[in-house]
Image (cartoon, helix red, strand yellow):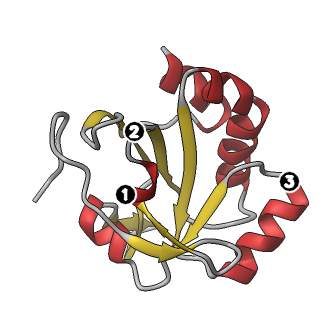
Amino acid sequence: MKLKIGDIAPGFSVKDQDGNLISLSDFKGKKVVLYFYPKDNTPGCTAESCNLRDNYQALQNAGYEVLGVSKDDEKSHQKFIAKFELPFTLLADTEKDIHEKYGTWVEKTNYGRKYMGTARMTFLIDEEGKIEEIIEKVKTKDHTAQILK
């Protein structure tokens, strides 16, 4: 089932970079930027995360909490956060539960080879837990502008 604007964002509980259990319901009453990215420390994912880092105050001023999601584990997320001084939470979706719920675990093709991987997508979730926007064509170096437009 493909999610669409106006749908209730699927709930989840998964560990963050520090091993704390984080649930979407923890953010009830707040707006959430839930961004899915393929892998820590890769060029596109670093550009996207650093763009969000550099504009984090503007996102917070607009009322958003930022949550990054990849299938990397807690240790990988800790290194990524430390290396690039990321001020927001990264979720370790190692079992791909959140990916499955949001439809971001997809078949991809690279040089004719098919494989399963993360679709780079962002879901903007309102204070009531409804999806208010889905950004499918993420501009990694200018992602905040897409969010705050």
Q: Nearer the viewer, residue 75 or 139?
A: 75
Q: Is 48 on the left-hand or right-hand side of 75?
A: left
Instruction: Give the CA distance from mark 2 to mark 3.
Output: 29 Å
- Distance from label 1 to label 3 (Cα)? 28 Å
Nearer mark to the viewer, of 2 and 3: 2
Which residue: 71% across, 35% down? Answer: 51
Dividing the picture into quarters, in which one does residue 6 lie?
top left
Q: Is residue 10 left or right of residue 84?
A: left
Q: Are marks 1 and 2 in contact (CB under 8 Å)?
A: no
Q: Which residue bears the numbered disc 2?
A: 29
Which residue in the protein does label 1 denote? 25
Q: Could you tell which of marks 1 and 3 lies nearer the N-terminus? A: 1
Precedes in sequence: disc 2 or disc 3: 2
Secondary element type, mark 2: loop
Q: Is 145 on the left-hand or right-hand side of 8?
A: right
Q: Is residue 94 above or below residue 31?
A: below
Question: Which class describes the residues within 10 Å of circle 2: few (<14), some (14-19), or many (20+)?
Answer: few
Which residue type carries mark 2? Gly
Name the residue carrying label 3. 84
* Residue 35 in the image, given as x and y percentages of width and height: 49, 49
Marks 1/3 in contact by CB < 8 Å: the verdict is no
Q: Quadrant of residue 15?
A: bottom right
From the top left corner, tell me how far across and down residue 7 is, in percent: 15, 43
The amino acid type, in three-letter code, at marker 1 is Ser
Q: Amino acid at mark 3?
A: Phe
